[in-house]
Amino acid sequence: MPRGDRTGPPGGSGPGAGKGIGRGGQGAGRMGGTRPGAGPVGNCVCPACGAKTVHQRGTPCYNINCPQCGTRMVRE
């Protein structure tokens, strides 16, 4: 319906049909997952020795050094 004459693809399928093509409905949703900004709860883990600490709100895990070996920690 580029001109409003209702001559678009049959069944309303095709690009721009509002079906969310390419999104797939996957992902952890808002504030979920292991990326930066993953929410206030969770743990920080050392990639070198495996030590875990509780994530502190407002402090990214990559700014915390491991208490055992000194390596920068990552979000679990």
Image: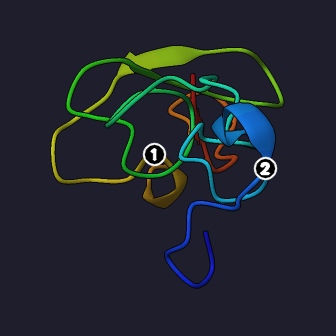
What label sits on residue 40 in the rendered view? none
Quadrant (top left, top right, bottom left, bottom right) of the N terminus: bottom right
Mark 2 and mark 1: span between their CA atoms?
50 Å
Question: Which one is in front, 30 or 15?
Answer: 15
Q: Quadrant of residue 47?
A: top right
- From the viewer's perspective, tell me whether residue 6 is left or right of residue 8: left
Question: Which one is in front, 51 or 11?
Answer: 11
Q: Earlier in the sequence, mark 2 or mark 1?
A: 2
Q: Quadrant of residue 51?
A: top right
Residue furthest to the bottom in view is: 3
Q: Which residue is pictured at 33% across the width and 36% down the height?
A: 30
Q: Which residue is pictured at 61% across the width and 48% down the height?
A: 17
Label 2: few (<14), some (14–19) or many (≥20) C-alpha neighbours in 10 Å:
few
In the rendered image, the vertical position of residue 36 relative to residue 43, given as above or below: below
Q: Which residue is mark 1?
A: 61
- Name the spot of residue 25 as percent of width and height, x first: 59, 23
Q: Which residue is pictured at 57% across the width and 60% down the height?
A: 6
Q: Which residue is mark 2?
A: 9
Query: Which numbered mark, 2 or 1, is in the foreground of this view?
Result: 2
- Name the spot of residue 40 as percent of width and height, x first: 20, 31
- From the viewer's perspective, tell me whether residue 25 is left or right of residue 21: left
- Name the spot of residue 36 as percent of width and height, x first: 48, 52
Q: Which residue is pictured at 53% across the width and 54% down the height?
A: 62
- Amino acid type assigned to the residue bearing label 2 in the image: Pro
- From the viewer's perspective, tell me whether residue 69 is left or right of residue 73: right
Q: How many marks?
A: 2
* Helix, strand or loop at mark 1: helix
- Name the spot of residue 11 as percent of width and height, x first: 69, 31
- Amino acid type assigned to the residue bearing label 1 in the image: Cys
